Image (cartoon, helix red, strand yellow):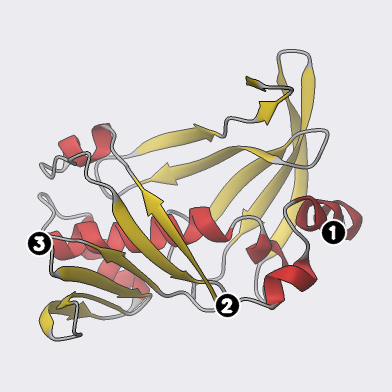
């Protein structure tokens, strides 16, 4: 198992390289049916993320205005000005903040909290596999056309805010992440499968 994890981390840049950095910045455009389900439609405006790699912490800019950003940690979500002035915030345990999102009709803090833990999970995969408290087991592989992808089941500790405790990740023959499965229970209840497109030989697949 550890050999597989080591190969995955090396393929994605190497764990020693990962440890040299404290955060990553990304510009994203996101959307999907989920935001419509919670009556929070998503526009196509690019947003800037600042994601901390060795602690669960993230900010998104802009959020609700060009001079506003989010500030996410597992036990706090806030909307702040770019200067750090708090406009609104909510604090509590991970369980309490997650439970608030299960109520009918999200508010702007619910959405910001979801954006925080979701994007942190996506942008720190697969390096959290080496984190303390993470449990990893190998599961049945997945066949995608003529390829066989290695499956890993990850159990997250209750100190990490994320979609759900158990999530499955699949890696291709080159140990690149290709699929991510999880369960959402904050806007109804449904399973989610995300595929990651790969560029190989000038073709996307």
The disc, 3 or 1, on the residue closer to the chain's N-terminal end is: 1
Marks 2 & 3, CB-CB < 8 Å contact? no
Of the 4 image quadrants, the one containing the N terminus is: bottom right
Alpha carbons under labels 1 and 2: distance apart? 18 Å
Residue at 71% of width from left, 13% of height from top? 145
Q: On the picture, is 40 further left or further right than 197?
A: left
Which residue is tagged 2?
A: 54
Comparing 58 with 188, the one in front is: 58
The disc, 1 or 2, on the residue closer to the chain's N-terminal end is: 1
Tag in front: 2 or 3: 3
How busy is the neighbourhood of tag 3: few (under 14 within 10 Å), some, or many (20 plus)?
Answer: few
Residue 165 in view (yes/no): no
Comparing 11 with 82, the one in front is: 82
Marks 1 & 2, CB-CB < 8 Å contact? no
Of the 4 image quadrants, the one containing the C terminus is: top right
The disc, 2 or 3, on the residue closer to the chain's N-terminal end is: 2
Residue 17 in view (yes/no): yes
Q: Give the vertical position of 169 relative to 21 (above or below).
A: above
Which residue is tagged 1?
A: 6
Residue at 10% of width from left, 58% of height from top? 107
Tag in front: 3 or 1: 3
Q: On the picture, is 94 further left or further right than 63?
A: right
Q: Give the vertical position of 12 relative to 177 (above or below).
A: below
Q: On the picture, is 40 further left or further right than 34?
A: left
Which residue is tagged 3?
A: 65
User: What is the residue that sits farthest to the right in this orientation?
Assistant: 3
Residue 59, percent from left and from top: 33, 70
Residue at 91% of width from left, 56% of height from top? 3
Q: On the picture, is 133 further left or further right than 71?
A: right
Residue 20, percent from left and from top: 69, 78
């Amino acid at each position: 198992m550890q050999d597989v994890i080591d190969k995955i981390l090396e393929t994605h840049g190497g764990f020693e390289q990962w440890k040299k950095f404290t955060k990553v910045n990304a510009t994203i455009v996101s959307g999907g049916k989920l935001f419509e389900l919670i009556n929070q439609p998503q526009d196509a405006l690019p947003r800037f993320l600042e994601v901390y790699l060795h602690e669960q912490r993230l900010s998104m800019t802009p959020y609700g205005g060009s001079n506003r950003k989010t500030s996410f940690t597992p036990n706090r979500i806030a909307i702040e000005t770019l200067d750090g002035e708090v406009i609104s915030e909510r604090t509590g345990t991970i369980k309490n903040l997650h439970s608030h999102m299960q109520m009918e009709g999200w508010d702007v803090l619910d959405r910001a909290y979801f954006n925080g833990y979701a994007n942190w999970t996506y942008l720190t995969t697969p390096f959290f596999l080496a984190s303390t408290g993470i449990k990893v087991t190998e599961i049945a592989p997945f066949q995608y056309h003529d390829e066989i992808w290695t499956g890993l089941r990850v159990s997250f500790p209750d100190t990490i805010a994320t979609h759900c405790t158990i999530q499955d990740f699949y890696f291709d023959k080159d140990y690149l992440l290709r699929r991510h499965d999880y369960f959402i229970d904050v806007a109804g209840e449904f399973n989610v499968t995300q595929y990651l497109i790969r560029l190989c030989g000038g073709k996307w697949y």
